[in-house]
Image (cartoon, coloured by chain):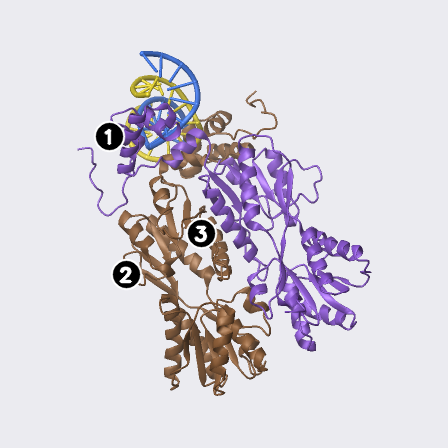
Chain colours: A brown, B purple, C blue, D yellow
Amino acid sequence: MTQPDVQRGRHQVPPTLATVADEAGVSRQTVSNALNNPDLLRPETLERVQSVIERLGYSPNRAARQLRTRSSHLIGLRFEPAQEGTSNALMDRFLHSLVETASRTGHHVLLFSGDPDNPLDGYDDLLRSTAVDAFVVTDTYAGTPQSVFLEERGAPFVAFGRPWDEPDADHAWIDVDGAHGARIATEHLLAEGHRRIAWLGWERSSRIGQDRRSGWQSAMHAAGEDVRGLGVRLTDNVDAARMRAHELLQDPSVTGFVCASDTLGIGVLHACADRGLRPGTDIGVVGFDDSLAAQVTWPGLTSVRQPLEQVAVELVRILHLVLAHKQIDTKGQMLQPALVVRRSSQRSG
Amino acid sequence: MTQPDVQRGRHQVPPTLATVADEAGVSRQTVSNALNNPDLLRPETLERVQSVIERLGYSPNRAARQLRTRSSHLIGLRFEPAQEGTSNALMDRFLHSLVETASRTGHHVLLFSGDPDNPLDGYDDLLRSTAVDAFVVTDTYAGTPQSVFLEERGAPFVAFGRPWDEPDADHAWIDVDGAHGARIATEHLLAEGHRRIAWLGWERSSRIGQDRRSGWQSAMHAAGEDVRGLGVRLTDNVDAARMRAHELLQDPSVTGFVCASDTLGIGVLHACADRGLRPGTDIGVVGFDDSLAAQVTWPGLTSVRQPLEQVAVELVRILHLVLAHKQIDTKGQMLQPALVVRRSSQRSG
DNA sequence: ATGAAAGCGCTAACAA
DNA sequence: TTGTTAGCGCTTTCAT
């Protein structure tokens, strides 16, 4: 009897390489080869071993493998504490894609938290304990201390987000072209016949905000429109946007709004409702990030959608190159967002 | 010179227990004790070892520790592919709390994906490879094949969600009392003076939906109100809700709506707008889940908020008991949601 | 094509 | 209180 006593009620002890080897009548090494270098085995041996593996439901012990190969097949991602009101749905969509993509190459995503005031901790610990193979760094909006830190340590990582303040940063990154997003949003409104199009964005300190704003600006310039007095900076908040929209709408020539977020876009829609203006017909409004709120709000908010699925795919692809110490074609890669048109910007809606 | 050659450009080789032991002039075991059983060391030895650990930036290798202790300090969570339009913001908030809470006891969250058609895969693999210590099962809305599977395997896990179809399930679970949520929502509308209050919910097949519906029903009964013709089942979709709301609003005595989701609630708000009815003043509307959409939509949608932070805390607490094979006080624990009142339900708004 | 030996870094059990 | 020994399950190297 090779069957060990069933430990009653407790979890079963998983079979090991040795169990499989005994059962198949080969050495442990041969089983290992069946898994990692199947070509080395004679077809009949391979088949025999594989059937035993199948029958026993054997899976290599990760800890042992990790200890030996120094590879955990884990990708670390720092998951910031939720910020109420922030479009964290974005993160959700991205995370799904990342988990999905990583799983296709047998990798899992390890989430860790960290003190928001200390953007480095968490990374250091995982690195020293060799818990993860690599990191995906997402919070580059706040500057890039993590990237600098990880670079110094020679730790493998890829960033979602440009190294805004580090022109000579030496790591791989993927980002979404926010300027392009704002540009196509603005061009869309121009095509709908709007001329005086306002920008509602964040404070100057936000690099992402500045980038998006520049897209609006360049589209307006290209159309020969003057932007003076049309660019507004405020906090990401419905009521703030609503109030500023009211101010802008006192000038009846202003009929278009491009916003740095859906939250701000919805604030503009509120202002329209207050004034009895019909979104789409009278006023064109575009938001940013294509959140659930943009989809369900009345009458549907046109929004710039980031290709997060594609970001995840590229991120994982580059990560594999980095881990293999392969040459990377380009340090940085910019992906283009797309406009999701809804009734808030369609005159013929 | 104990300092090894610095490998140029590549990631540094982290120090091991042996390095620390040499440096501190003690045995490896003593260093291990300094970490895991500090009480065993003489204070001066402890301090010496700790200072070396500090200086070298030593952290125990996780794989080695895991191999030895058979504990990875990893909690597995299956992260379903995003469902467009679903309130996945809920998941986001929950996940943040879980990661945060788990980290307080040195645990990390491992995300894995799985084919939606095969709710079991992913679990099996991680279990057999002993990659995680335990699971948190969240997708119990779809029945509980995972719970049954994990129970059979004797795998440690805790569920977020009741074992709806398994009255004699033997695992620990935490859930939010959806019936209570709908009840306080209904009572709130009754208190605002509404009498004929409709229910917009999901198909009968949704256990969560049925549960929430029962809360509306019981509150109406308690108030002596007849619910005939007031309970409606539909898909979770703004336009569907809007259309059904129009049908219900043809009866002018209907002035209140309790909904199984914010999406449905927003559909009702749209119907009100169509008919020139003022939410709050003319019609009281309550949604469910307190999503970002509920917060930003005009004029603010009153909603039932789940205590997800508390769920995460309890989940982790119970998980530790399960892992320690300790007795659990109660198999299941129900947490109460709270009503977040906004203008969609306030007459004096 | 298959097997034997060694060792990754750690901790449990025991000895001193 | 500290040190010694053994071994977790796997893969790499070398021998057959």
Which is nearer the eye, A127 or A145? A145
Point 54% across, 73% down: residue? A301
Q: Are marks 2 and 1 on the same chain?
A: no
Which is nearer the eye, B270 or A108? B270
Q: Which chain is disc 1 placed on? A: B
Q: Residues within 10 Å of mark 1 (few under 14, many from 20)?
A: some
Answer with left or right where residue B25 lies relative to residue A87.
left
- Which quarter of the image is occupied by the C terminus of chain A? bottom right
Between marks 3 and 1, how big is the CA–CA gap? 36 Å
Residue A272: tell me if it is visible. Answer: yes
Question: At numbered mark 1, what does the secondary structure look like: helix, strand or loop?
Answer: helix
- Which quarter of the image is occupied by the N terminus of chain A? top right
Residue B24 pos. (x, y %): 25, 28
Q: Which chain is disc 2 placed on? A: A
Q: Is residue B47 above or below residue A134?
A: above
Between marks 2 and 1, how big is the CA–CA gap? 38 Å
Residue B341 pos. (x, y %): 62, 62
Amino acid type for the residue under numbered disc 3: Phe
Determine which residue is flagged by label 3: A79
The image quadrant that residue B293 belongs to is bottom right
Q: Is residue B164 above or below residue A87?
A: above
Determine which residue is flagged by label 1: B23
Amino acid type for the residue under numbered disc 2: Glu
Point 53% across, 82% down: residue? A283
Amino acid type for the residue under numbered disc 1: Glu
Residue at the limit of the structure toward the front, as seen here: B348
Q: Are marks 2 and 3 on the same chain?
A: yes
Which is nearer the eye, B205 or B95? B95
Point 33% across, 53% down: residue? A146
Q: Is residue B293 above or below residue A13?
A: below
Determine which residue is flagged by label 2: A166
Residue B204: tell me if it is visible. Answer: no
